[in-house]
Amino acid sequence: MVLVPNPSVKNTVSSPIAKSDNFQALTKARANENICWLVACVGAGKNRGNVLQGYSAIVDPDGTMVACGPRAAECIVKGEIDVEQIYKLRKTLTVYEDRALPI
């Protein structure tokens, strides 16, 4: 499991939605490419005058959002993590067997 704390996703005037959408897409990609569960903890609310975007999430190894918090609101995100799913995926996706080790 990878834990990604990210307090810096700010709700800016220029692109508040695009920034959180990009972060959400990248968390899905990181979970999928590493074949692992990813928990993204994103700051929400106000901190020292900054408005933080929120949008914490739990992503499975397929890149599917299991649970996601709301935008710009503090909350606790809960989801069930199935560790067996990682083992099943790693048997079918042979990325570790395909790597070339140094000679």
Image (cartoon, rainbow, N blue to C red):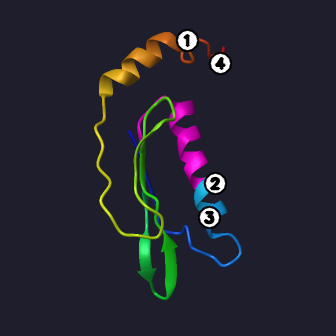
Rendering coords of residue 61 (x, y %)? 46, 31
Q: Earlier in the sequence, mark 3 or mark 2?
A: 3
Extreme-bottom residue of the structure: 49
Residue where numbered disc 4 is placed: 102
In the displayed structure, would residue 53 be above or below residue 57?
A: below
Is residue 39 in view? no
- The total of numbered circles placed on residues is 4
Q: Which mark is residue 49?
A: none
Residue where numbered disc 2 is placed: 22
Label 1 packing within 10 angstroms: few (<14), some (14-19), many (20+): few
- Is 83 placed left or right of 9 in the picture? left
Disc 3 and disc 4: Cα gap in Å? 44 Å
In the displayed structure, would residue 62 be above or below residue 52?
A: above
Rendering coords of residue 9 (x, y %)? 55, 67
Q: Earlier in the sequence, mark 4 or mark 2?
A: 2
Amino acid under disc 3: Ile
Amino acid under disc 1: Glu
Q: Report the mark closest to the observer, 3 or 4.
A: 3
Point out the stretch of residues depicted in magenta. Answer: 23-39
Disc 2 and disc 1: Cα gap in Å? 31 Å
Q: Which mark is residue 97?
A: 1
Mark 3–mark 2 CB contact (< 8 Å):
no
Label 4 packing within 10 angstroms: few (<14), some (14-19), many (20+): few
Q: Quick one: SS at disc 2?
A: helix
Disc 3 and disc 1: Cα gap in Å? 39 Å
Q: Quick one: SS at disc 1?
A: loop
Residue where numbered disc 3 is placed: 17
